[in-house]
Amino acid sequence: MNIHIVFYSLYGHMYQMARAAAEGAMEVDGAEVKLFQVPETLPDQVLEMMGAVGAKKALADVPIATANDLADARFQGRHVAQIAGKLFG
């Protein structure tokens, strides 16, 4: 069972929620859970002014889901129908 969790997090709060959801989903036998973030739209200068640079660096290891991935009805090489669960936050 494939579960993809896609989130946007400016200060890390949604990332914490996404990780908690992933941990819960991983408790299901056979679950393959992956976290993805959406691309940042704010310029670096704005992130600095908002004090969000450190939080964004903490997300550096989370792969980015692109609009094309979602629009193509395929995600990581799989048809969306093969993904058992999707969580957007």
Image (tube, rainbow, N blue to C red):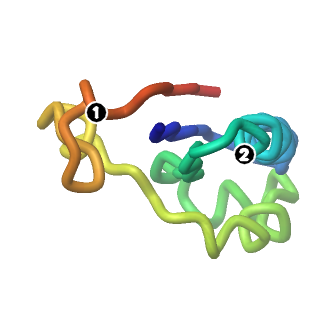
Q: CA distance from mark 1 to mark 2?
A: 17 Å
| Residue placed most toward the observer, 67 or 34 | 34
Q: Residue at x 71, y 58 (%)?
A: 47
- Which residue is under mark 1? 82
Indicate the position of residue 24 as horizontal and vertical percent values: 81, 36
Q: Would you place residue 54 above or below residue 23 in this image? A: below
Tell me where residue 74 sits by quadrant.
top left
Quadrant of image for the C terminus: top right
Label 1: which secondary element? helix
**Residue hosting label 2:** 26
x, y percentage for residue 82? 28, 33
Q: Residues within 10 Å of mark 2 (few under 14, many from 20)?
A: some
Q: Is residue 76 left or right of residue 64?
A: left
Which residue is located at x 28 percent, y 54 percent? 76
Depth order, front residue of 89/45: 89
Q: Is residue 7 above or below residue 62?
A: above
Q: Residue furthest left?
A: 72
Q: In the image as oriented, which residue stretches furthest toward the front?
A: 29
Residue at 60%, 38% (x, y): give it.
Answer: 7
Q: Quadrant of residue 25?
A: top right
x and y percent of residue 79 in the render? Answer: 18, 36
Please report the residue visible at 46 percent of the width from the left and 52 percent of the height from the top.
Answer: 39
Q: Position of residue 66 (x, y in %)?
A: 32, 49
